[in-house]
Amino acid sequence: MPYQSPISPGRSWYEDTAGPRPEYKALDGDLSCDVVVVGGGFTGLSAAVYLARAGSNVVLIDAHRFGDGASGRNGGQLGTGQRAWAEELEAEYGFSRAKALFDLAEEAKAHLLEFAAVNKIEIDYMPGQMSVAHKQRYVDDYKVHAEIMANRFGYPHISFMDARETAERLGSARYFGGTRDTGTGHIHPLKLVIGTAKVAAQAGAQLFEQTPATAIASVGGKVRVTTPKGTISAGKCLIGVNAHGGTLEPISAAHIMPIGSFIGATVPLADSSVLPGGEAVDDSRFVVRYFRKSTDGRLLFGGREIYAVSDPKDIHVHIRRQIAELYPDLRDVEITHGWGGYVGITMPRKPFVREVMPNVISVGGYSGHGVMLSNFFGKLYAETVAGNRDRLRLIEDLNIPAFPGGRRLRAPLLFLALNWYALRDRI
């Protein structure tokens, strides 16, 4: 029987096309190490690579299998810069800091592609991404954004598209304009997870799946991570569980909220008018829709975020309905895969980095922009362990408020607020 993630609904197209997915044994017994990493997604695995290469004795644990969370099940889009547009960051922080944050994200993009190439990880990279306006009144913002990126932030790869060009490049007339970014692209995320884990193991990191952390304590300059069958003692700890922190420690849980996002994969499309250039797409809805073509011509369409605790009963039905809104000819298209996963968001949709107890740093809250950033933040954590915290501190110093309502009320309050924004998307 095919493996089914216990924390994410449905079986993904990625799982059926990633090739062999090695299994790593569970921890059985006590260990001592220099650094313990909790979480086997992009952040943790990348950190394990660079820590081990620098000579640290690293132990990494994951409660399930590597890639069961968002790292192995996401939309695969890299994006450009931070999640917030550079001009929005400039309005909040000033030009110098906004430029530094943008440059850091661009370095993250280059790092991901170079890491995959150097380590011979085939990630199915396809170039190009379009961001499109689902309302006419947003179009001018996209035009100004393209100009600002070229003239102020030194990024010439974004061009404005009017309604006609947008329709031609999407194969759909449902959007009013947008931008096309030729300096980024999209990937097969699970292949990157599998490849990064192999590189980490080859570098000497000790990797354990099916090993949940049940408690973390920092006492007397040492960190102790408790698991069901052993305790790990370390000098330092990285928490990289993002949306799956639960009750592991309260500070991250107060600042990072899990939301569900769902994707469907169609059969390979014979109609070449759908995304003929092969770019990925995201739109201007608050409850964003994101879609792209796979290397074998399928439409991978994501767009049904949920903020309640229960998952939709039939992912296929909801995804097909949204596809049909953009591509009426695909109203009856066969959807071969429907799956979901949980994304960690913060209130301002900026990443969360915090020392949550002595020698324990938590990294997450990528808010839908984690494919590119999370891999690089793992590298920045390794830099921090080596004594250079300056670049990680660029993110650590961002103002990330806790969600209101405490642990009991924050989920219902977020559900009401975000469904209000979803309603506004339709008005």
Image (cartoon, rainbow, N blue to C red):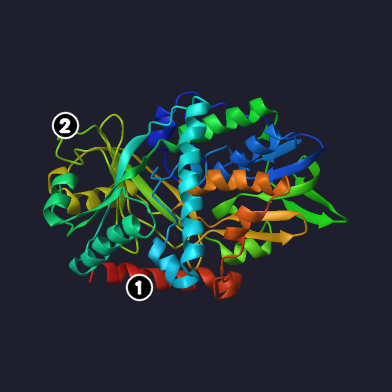
Query: Which residue is pictured at 45% across the width and 48% down the height?
Result: 106
Mark linked to residue 96 = none
Which mark is first along the chain, 1 or 2?
A: 2
Left or right? Give the position of 31 relative to 51. right
Left or right? Give the position of 41 relative to 362. left
Query: 10 Å neighbourhood of mark 2: few (<14), some, or many (≥20)?
Result: few
Residue 45 x %, y %: 60, 39
Left or right? Give the position of 173 relative to 397. left
Residue 410 x %, y %: 53, 71
Q: Is residue 108 above or below residue 352?
A: above
- Observer-nearest residue: 396 or 418? 396
- Observer-nearest residue: 85 or 278? 85
Q: Marks 2 and 1, how far apart in space?
A: 38 Å
Left or right? Give the position of 45 relative to 216. left
Give the structural element (helix, strand or loop) at label 1: helix
Give the structural element (helix, strand or loop) at label 2: loop
- Observer-nearest residue: 134 or 98? 98
Q: Is residue 157 above or below residue 205?
A: below
Whether residue 68 appears in this view of the structure is yes
Mark linked to residue 270 = 2
Query: Which residue is pictured at 74% across the width and 53% down the height?
Result: 215
Q: Quadrant of the C terminus?
A: bottom left
Query: 10 Å neighbourhood of mark 1: few (<14), some, or many (≥20)?
Result: few
- Name the amino acid type tagged 1: Trp
Query: Which residue is pictured at 76% across the width and 35% down the height?
Result: 57
Residue 80 x %, y %: 39, 50
Q: Identify the residue under disc 1.
A: 420
Q: How many marks?
A: 2
Q: Is residue 398 above or below residue 77?
A: below
- Name the amino acid type tagged 2: Ala
